[in-house]
Image (cartoon, rainbow, N blue to C red):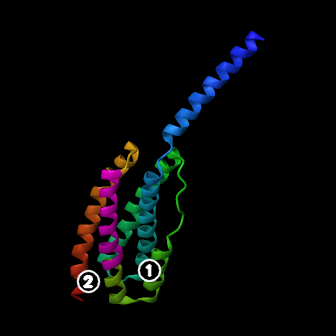
Amino acid sequence: MRFTRHLLAAAAVIAALGNQAWAADKLEASDASMLKDIAQANIAEVETGKLAVEKTTNSDVKKFAQMMVDDHGEGLSDVKALASTKGVELPDSPDVKHKAVMLEFKALKGDLFDSRYVKQAGVGDHEATEKLLKKTQADAKDADVKALATKMLPVVQGHLKHAQDLAVKTAKK
């Protein structure tokens, strides 16, 4: 009887410690939401980048689009890895807003496509993502989420600068 009580007490302690460790890895709702938003930004850049690689005949736009696919694909992998350890389920396709943009992009051709892609996916989306990453750095409570935003921010800022320069070039055509 005494052995059974000790065994039950030990099991209760182990269960409690296991639950605490599990809870420590769970994110607050606001941090989980920021992580989902970061994933969504990466998904959108990968998808629009793939479309641009297929549609554009402009070598500069094609190089930029391929960089978006590669860099944001890597960023998405980082987000997925962190989400997996934190128990956060991420979206696996573009949100409604980005699906609408994709439909618009699919209907465009030539210089008009290039210009809209660079302005919207290049400049506009990267401005929004830069803002999101800065907010995440400032407001996230989880150190790993903050670290991810810190790692991604310089890449996004580099993309934004590149897109701004490319927007000037494509506007001149």
The amino acid on which the numbered mark 2 sits, given as a three-letter code, is Thr
Q: Position of residue 69 (x, y in %)?
A: 41, 66
Q: Residue at x 41, y 69 (%)?
A: 45
Q: Residues within 10 Å of mark 2 (few under 14, many from 20)?
A: some
* Quarter the N terminus occupies: top right
Q: Secondary structure at mark 2?
A: helix
Q: Position of residue 53 (x, y in %)?
A: 41, 76
* Quarter the C terminus occupies: bottom left
Q: Residues within 10 Å of mark 1 (few under 14, many from 20)?
A: some
The amino acid on which the numbered mark 1 sits, given as a three-letter code, is Val
Q: Circle 1 sits on which residue?
A: 101
Residue 120 highlighted magenta (yes or no) = yes
Q: Is residue 3 left or right of residue 63?
A: right
Of the residues under marks 1 and 2, which one precedes in the sequence? 1
Alpha-carbon span between mark 1 and mark 2: 19 Å
Magenta span covers which residues? 119-139
Q: Position of residue 68 (x, y in %)?
A: 37, 67
Which label lies toward us, 1 or 2? Answer: 1
Q: Circle 2 sits on which residue?
A: 170
Q: Residue at x 21, y 80 (%)?
A: 168
Nearest to the observer: residue 93 or residue 55: 93
Nearest to the observer: residue 128 or residue 44: 128
Q: Is residue 143 left or right of residue 154?
A: right
Q: Would residue 78 be seen by someone viewing this image from the given angle?
A: no
Residue 124 in the image: above or below residue 154: below
Q: Splitting the image into 4 quarters, where does residue 111 fall?
A: bottom left
Please identify the dominant SS of the magenta region: helix
